[in-house]
Amino acid sequence: MKAVLARVNLPDFGMPLGPPEMSGRVYASRLASLIDRVGASGLQILLIYADREHSANLAWLTGFDPRFEEALLILLPGRTPALFVGPENFGFAATARIDLSVVPYPPFGLMGQDRSRTPPLADLLRDQGVAAGMTIGIAGWKYYGEAESPSAATWSEAPSFIVDTLRAIAGPSGSVVNAGALFMHPTTGLRAVNEIDQLAAFEFASCHTSQAVKNVLFGVQPGMSEFEAAQLLAPVGLPLSCHPMLTAGPHVALGLGSPGPRRMERGDPFTVAYGVWGALTCRAGWLVANAGELPIAVRDYVDKLAAPYFLAVAEWYETVGIGVTGGALDAVIRRHLGDPFFGLFLPPGHLIHLDEWMNTPIYPGSEERLVSGQALQVDIIPATGTPYFTANMEDGIALLDARGRAEFAERHPAAWQRIGKRRTFMEDLLGIRLKPEVLPFSQIPAYLPPFILAPEMALVRDP
């Protein structure tokens, strides 16, 4: 099977008018599940740390995420959870969707604010039930394994002043352990499997990230500055999961760059990525209209890089499904792109949530199986480190079994219609046949125009 460039009519799949509402029942169920999991794991109390960049665990549980400041939730089974917040979040804590006692803690605020009447942190924690001899779990935004350290269970990425205080209270008869896996393990973590309404919220988010990237693909022109091109994203204000990325020219190969004032030129390598809670969309290629405008050394870009990449991702799409192991997906990509030229160094795909990369069950030899309710990022990036640059068509999908699909269609009919149209487009125009449980969320699903100035020319399978 080959991949060829063809003129493709990319449909307008329709845009949602607003995000789906997450009911209070969803948050109550999450809290009950977490309390059960805390008990089963041998913990006596759980703390969840969050800051502006690392708030997914706390936001998933409560619906509240700290703005500007930090926050700490203390969950002692049988007691109302306590949320420590800085002064600017004291009012905003009312956005929480579960019952909480809100405790002001000025040191979580910004520098220079009054902290003269702050009680000692140890006293505040003891007031909430933290005691000597306890096994205390603290979850931040990572956890660690034996590959990092034989004592990984005691490693914590939460701030030292919190962890040190907890260890002092627990004393020699207690312990403080990393509890991030309760939320973030790729198969058993509570955030690894999503409710129907949460998946619908991710589809809403993906509509906006992918439409934003589509705006750039069909609007960018040589002579624009990167700043001007980034304005085409036209964000609607959804919370970001990462900084917007748009770069072209000599510095693009460094990756992860934010747009700047440089004016883009015909013949530049080009990349754009935009991510919000629950979705990220990325595309990469060249700012040319055809191969003749590429630098002479890379005029076989499509045959050498873009087409093999497209075929690899297409087979990934056809392989992914409920019950498939992460190792099987990894093997698909390595069979196509295993040559050192392609420079694969990250797992080919991962779970996505409010954080852009929650965790991944996809790695060599993985026996972890995908399940219904998971949201995945089709994130496969060849980092060639050569003048060929890269190719990228990064989008989000979800997996739902027959019962879940029926519930999704009933609860969110407009989103379900968009998903159906995307599946038809991928099969009929791109030649990618999805399993019934695979739900594409992007407005440019698997759509890869390698020459950005000819956005209507995309790669398709040619049997």
Image (spheres, rainbow, N blue to C red):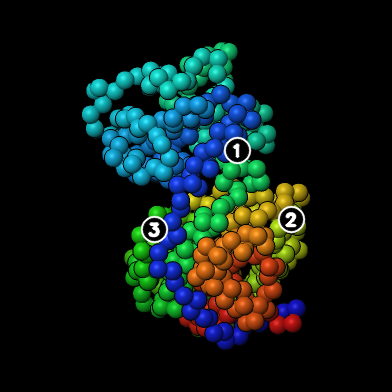
Residue 368 lies, in percent from the top left, at 72, 48
Residue 237 lies, in percent from the top left, at 35, 60
In the displayed structure image, the side of residue 150 where residue 291 appears, left or right:
left
Residue 386 appears in the rendering: no
Residue closest to the eye, 306 or 33: 33
* Residue kind at label 1, given as amino acid type: Ala
Considering only order in the chain, which callout, 3 or 2, is on the residue closer to the N terminus? 3
Closer to viewer: mark 2 or mark 3: 2
Secondary element type, mark 3? loop
Residue at image point 44% right, 78% down: 218
Residue at image point 28% right, 40% down: 91
Numbered mark located on residue 238 in the image: 3
Residue at image point 61% right, 54% down: 374
Query: How far, Cα to Cα, is label 1 from label 2?
Result: 21 Å
- Within 10 Å of disc 2 (Cα), the crowding (few <14, some 14-19, many 20+) is few
Report which residue position mark 1 lands on: 181
